[in-house]
Amino acid sequence: MSRFLSRAAAALQPYTPGEQPRDTHYIKLNTNENPYSPAPEVAAAISAFNASDLRLYPDPTASDFRDAAAAHYGVKPEQVFAGGGSDEVLAYAFMAFSDRGGKVYFPDITYGFYKVYADLFGLKSVLIPLKSDFTVNIEDYFGLNGNIFIANPNAPTGICLETDEIEQILRENPDRLVVVDEAYIDFSDGKSCLRMIDSYDNLLVVHTFSKSRGLAGMRLGLGFGNPELIAGLERIKYSFNPYNLDRVSFAVGIAALGNGEYMREIAAKIIKTRERLREELLMLGFEVLPSSANFLFAKTPELSGAELYNSLKQSGILVRHFDKARIRDFVRITIGTDDEMDIFLDKLRKLL
Ligand SMILES: *Cc1c(COP(=O)(O)O)cnc(C)c1O
């Protein structure tokens, strides 16, 4: 570690992203990327992009992209914030709405970045244990003393709350912000809370283009909330990185939003493959959590999570293993194409 590191920076435990191997011989089922290409309009927008436009700074207000998102989702542009991936939207939400030393609440098993951001911004994380079946007990979230972060569907479990359950949490915390991270919502059969931003000024809904739109390589995310909340995020943006999205990202984002039908088609294919894989894993004696996302969280009595992860890696398949209390026995398997799942099952049968 550099001797120049601040004490705060030295104390951080940064987020560990899933492996991104440089060689391509792995079947990559470890970071919940989409096995299908982004909408064809995206390739067209990139080909049509005029490189000489890159001389100029991008629009710091992200107007065209926000207008496109607002039209697509049926909200007002003032209710939309544009970020470089949803991680950036989440980071700004941590920065904008919690004072140093304050508490933030989230489940003990959830997206690992919440804890990392809380530490980075000097907040106290309060981890609320999920029930033994890894579902959320919503009463645990009533009347809390700080802002609340909920991934819905949750990661890495894939389990989804109903919108009326989220609504109860919103009602029971009228003076607290509830951030609902809907990274996987397009795989969930209509459980989005987006429609509630008009009724609840304490709701921020966060979306990403990385999963259902097949654009993890582009870094595009959106935040939805009432205009004052969005203005709060803008304050942070203009205090940190006003040009947070570049011109290519805007072009790609607008193109992707222009073909919602394509996104729904590939999401439906992934859901179908997910349910088939789930059946197959159950037949092989796995325990599989019910998933509303583009991955399955599963364990077998025959091998530990680490053993399963390692053996699969040796046979050319990357899945995600979290060496963490309560979920050590599980692996998280991203849903790939049907062909990839057949190879995965084949290797798996040989291991067991
Ligand atoms: C993948 C993921 C994100 C991050 O998405 P980006 O938009 O790529 O930054 C956010 N939240 C959850 C729960 C995720 O799984």
Image (cartoon, rainbow, N blue to C red):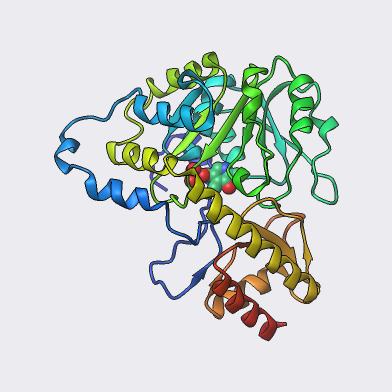
Q: Which of the 4 image quarters holds residue 205?
A: top right
Residue at 38% over, 31% down: 65
- On-image quarter of the C terminus: bottom right
Q: How many marks?
A: 0
The residue most toward the front is 261
Q: Is residue 44 above or below residue 164?
A: below
Q: Nearer the viewer, residue 239 or 277?
A: 277
Which residue is found at the position 73% from the left and 73% from the top?
280
Picture quadrant where residue 139 is located: top right
Quarter of the image where ligand 1 sits: top right
| Residue 352 vertical position relative to residue 266 in the rendered view, above or below | below
Q: What residue appears at the point 66 percent right and 31 percent down from the top-left corner? A: 193
Q: What residue sits 40% from the left and 51% below the top? A: 217
Mark yes or no: residue 326 visible.
yes
Q: Position of residue 134 (x, y in %)?
A: 79, 49
| Residue 300 placement (x, y as % from top left) | 77, 71
* Closer to us: 256 or 227: 256
Percent x, y of residue 218: 38, 47
Q: Position of residue 138 (x, y in %)?
A: 82, 33
- Among all residues in the image, which is located at the extreme bottom? 350
Q: From this viewpoint, is residue 322 visible? A: no
Image-based side of 153 in relation to 282, left or right: left
Foreground: 319 or 56? 56
Q: Examine the image and state in which quarter residue 142 appears.
A: top right
